[in-house]
Amino acid sequence: MSKVVSNAMEACEGVESSMTLLLGGFGLCGIPENSIAALKEMGVKNLTCVSNNAGVDDFGLGLLLQSRQIKKMISSYVGENALFEKQYLDGDLDVELTPQGTLAERLRAGGAGIPAFYTPTGVGTMVAEGKEEREFDGRKYILEKGIKGDFAFVKAWKGDTLGNLVFKKTARNFNPMVATAGKITVAEVEELVEPGVLKPDEIHTPGIYVQRIFQGSNYEKRIEQLTLSEG
């Protein structure tokens, strides 16, 4: 069965309200822009979205916040989105803040079939509330659960029709972990090539993890915060 689909709308077929969606990216770098736009157009609601952050007010996952399609966010950093803050303070959005490294490992664990793991990160803080705590070699650890999603959405630089993916520089970020943890993983790529074009030792995500792939378009590649030196 071919993994190639024609566009983001076809790639998102089967996404339903109340599902858990995993999305790659860090800030606005390496986010699945086309897929997010398709999800907004579909109008699915009450979503639980797992992503390092929630985009900005008018871009990335911020678009789904605008249309109130997200019920819960599991994230690490959310400081660039005023709408996110307002919805949370108004009680319209559930938030599960997770330390960044823990979030990455929870996704990796979910993809590897590991239900839970112990980490020292968060011990003695609000992060540890309600979680099992154990001591190993004189140090305290808390139990964190792996994360799996109904759908996972990633954005890669290049991919082939078998689903093998190559990410470009820092746009790799959370994408490889996210790609392994979805029941259905959707990859959008800037360039779609035939099998054999990608060198085996440059592939970051093997195609076995990817069920659907398409060549995206009209990527804005916004800069989240632009800082210029004087002179």
Image (tube, grey):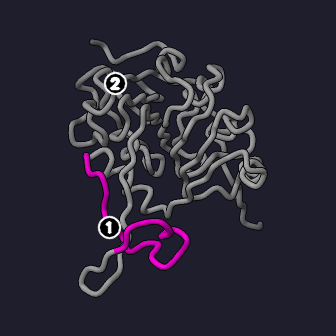
Range of the magenta residues? 113-133
Q: Is 96 above or below relative to 24?
A: below
What residue did someone put label 2 on?
211
Q: Amino acid at mark 1?
A: Tyr
Disc 1 element: strand
Give the quarter of the figure containing the C terminus: bottom right
Where does the image place residue 188, in percent across and percent down from the top left?
46, 28
| Left or right position of 207 against 74 | left
Given residues 8 and 203, the one toward you in this image is 8
Where does the image place residue 176, in percent across and percent down from the top left?
37, 44
Q: What whole-number distance in Å separates the C-alpha atoms at marks 1 and 2?
A: 31 Å
Q: Amino acid at mark 2?
A: Gln
Q: Residue at x 37, y 73 (%)?
A: 133
Magenta-colored stretch includes residue 87: no
| SS assignment for the magenta stretch, majority | loop
Magenta-colored stretch includes residue 130: yes
**Quadrant of res 192:** top left
| Left or right position of 138 against 34 | left
Disc 2 element: loop
Q: Residue at x 28, y 87 (%)?
A: 138
Q: Residue at x 55, y 71 (%)?
A: 126
Given residues 215 and 64, the one toward you in this image is 64
| Left or right position of 167 against 29 | left
Q: Is 127 above or below relative to 78?
A: below
What residue did someone put label 1 on?
118
Where does the image place residue 198, in percent across and percent down from the top left?
28, 32
